[in-house]
Amino acid sequence: MRMKIDGTCHCGSISFEADVDPDNAILCHCTDCQKISGAPCRACVPVLTENFKLKGEPKIYVKTGSSGAKRALAFCGTCGTALYSAAPENGTHVNLRLGWVNQRAQLPPKSQGFRRSAMPWIFDIREIQGVPRRNAANAKDAR
């Protein structure tokens, strides 16, 4: 089953359209994803390069993982939105970050990588009290 998705970075200067298999959405708990995203894990979905159309020019940071493999990380140079990762050269697919996908709620992860690096509390967040929306008075204190 294929799914058409699209999205934009936060400022709107970079956008994409893609055709993905929703069953391939994953969570990654590796320490690189934690550090680079500023979050306890990262959600993404792979897409073949021929099924990915990008408008705009992202900035690229090439990182070297603990395995020695290099990955090109794309982000918006204006707003900083994380966009995707790919092989630095001649890659066959890109891993789209779900944060900039408009249909992200319809792409629940089906697997998890690097669970040994997962924050010990990540699997128990359902019981944490939540509020439906921050109000303006609390916004300054919550940052």
Image: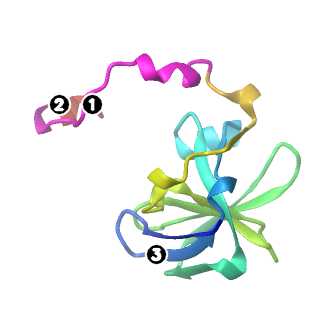
Q: In this view, does 79 lie to the left or right of 118?
A: left
The part of the image, by quadrant, that contains residue 73 is bottom right
Whole-percent x and y of residue 128?
A: 39, 19
User: Distance from label 3 to label 1 (Cα)?
Assistant: 29 Å
Question: Would residue 66 be visible to someone looking at this image?
Answer: yes
Question: Is 115 placed above or below 72 here?
Answer: above
Q: Dividing the image into 4 quarters, which one contains the N terminus?
A: bottom right
The part of the image, by quadrant, that contains residue 66 is top right
Q: Dividing the image into 4 quarters, which one contains the C terminus?
A: top left
Return the residue at label 1: 142
Q: Outermost residue, front direction?
A: 1
Residue stretch rendered in magenta on the structure: 120-137
Q: In this view, does 89 lie to the left or right of 135?
A: right
Whole-percent x and y of residue 70?
A: 81, 58
Amino acid on which the number 1 mark rests in the picture:
Ala
Label at residue 138: 2
- Neighbour class for label 1 at 10 Å: few (<14), some, many (≥20)? few
Q: Does the magenta stretch include residue 68?
A: no
Label at residue 33: none
The part of the image, by quadrant, that contains residue 63 is bottom right
- The first of marks 3 and 2 along the sequence is 3
Q: Nearer the viewer, residue 115 or 11?
A: 115
Q: Residue at x 57, y 74 (%)?
A: 18
Question: Is 8 placed above or below 103 here?
Answer: below
Q: Are marks 3 and 1 in contact (CB under 8 Å)?
A: no
User: Distance from label 2 to label 1 (Cα)?
Assistant: 6 Å
Q: Which of 116 and 50 is in front in this view?
A: 50
Whole-percent x and y of residue 98?
A: 53, 55
Label at residue 15: 3
* SS at circle 1: helix
